[in-house]
Amino acid sequence: MIKKTLYIPLMAAMFASCGTANQPKSENVMQELDTEPFADGIPAQIVVVGGEEYKYPIMAIWVEDLNGNYLGTLYASKSISTGVFRYGVYEKGKWMPGERNRPAALPRWKNVSTLKSSESQPVDAFSGATPFGSFTLKTRLPKGIDSIRVVMEVNKPWDFNNYWHNNRYPGDKEYATSGQPALIYEAVILKSSAEKQFYFKPIGHSHPSGSNGEIEPDISTFTSALKIVDRAWVEILK
């Protein structure tokens, strides 16, 4: 089970005590999550700084080798891991929590993890509620491999814009719950490098309705989705 800790920097706490906002800004609050997908792995932390459009997105973070072979999941939102969504079923005129298959949510992660996650990683080992803002994930990376890719997929439901509008694919119920498709970020980790921080960069997006797990590199039509994450990096801990 993921452990959570909430940190509010001293200066932020002082300002918050004088303010009137009900919810702290993401840059002032840093939640901490803990997972151990590789029990004897290399200690690391992943820092995700929420952007101005960070409003309870769905996300997953996993590791691959440089050939794209899936090695394991470091973190995934509980909703996508368990299939139980906050707005899963529509009953009596309103949305209610319930089970639902949403292939458009995180198509890449669902595709690469389907065959192996149930065999080697129990869901409780990496799933948890999506942090409400910026967070640090304390985790472990697989040892014995000098170079790996840490991949992050992020999506926010019903995130439409002028290009990815709600009538772009008429009749496609899966696309209708997503809007701008899930964005894919990656950080290439060289464990032998003198550098200890490796920054994520966007490399493309997933299929609009989740029909496959391919990555489309063109993200020129994306707007608000690019502001869900302000910046993120992986740090090797010694």
Image (tube, rainbow, N blue to C red):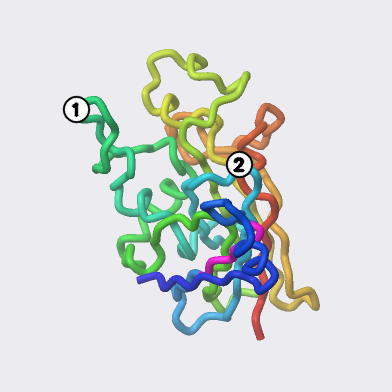
Coordinates of residue 205 in the picture (x, y in percent): 59, 38
Q: Is mark 2 on a helix, strand or loop?
A: loop
Which residue is the site of mark 2?
Answer: 53
Does the stretch in magenta take in 109?
no
Task: Tell me which residue sits at (62%, 59%) in the image.
Answer: 48
Query: Residue 37 has which mark?
Result: none
Q: What element carries label 1?
A: loop
How many numbered marks, from 0 up? 2
Coordinates of residue 36 in the picture (x, y in percent): 45, 75
Which residue is the site of mark 1?
Answer: 92
Nearer to the camera, 88 or 20? 20
Task: Tell me which residue sits at (37%, 23%) in the image.
Answer: 173
Quarter the N terminus occupies: bottom left
Coordinates of residue 202 in the picture (x, y in percent): 68, 46
Q: Crowdedness of circle 1 by 10 Å Cα count: few (<14), some, many (20+)? A: few
Vertical position of residue 72 compared to residue 99: above or below = below
Amino acid type assigned to the residue bearing label 2 in the image: Glu
Nearer to the camera, 60 or 15? 15
The extreme right residue here reads 194
Coordinates of residue 17 in the picture (x, y in percent): 60, 64
Nearer to the camera, 197 or 11? 11
Amino acid type assigned to the residue bearing label 1 in the image: Lys
Task: Tell me which residue sits at (66%, 74%) in the image.
Answer: 10
Query: Is residue 29 toward the left or the right of residue 58 in the image?
Result: right
Q: What stretch is highlighted in magenta?
A: 27-32
Whole-number angstrom distance, CA of label 1 to CA of label 2: 30 Å
Task: Tell me which residue sits at (67%, 27%) in the image.
Answer: 221
Query: Is residue 5 toward the left or the right of residue 162 in the image?
Result: left
Query: Is residue 73 toward the left or the right of residue 95 in the image?
Result: right
Nearer to the camera, 84 or 169? 84
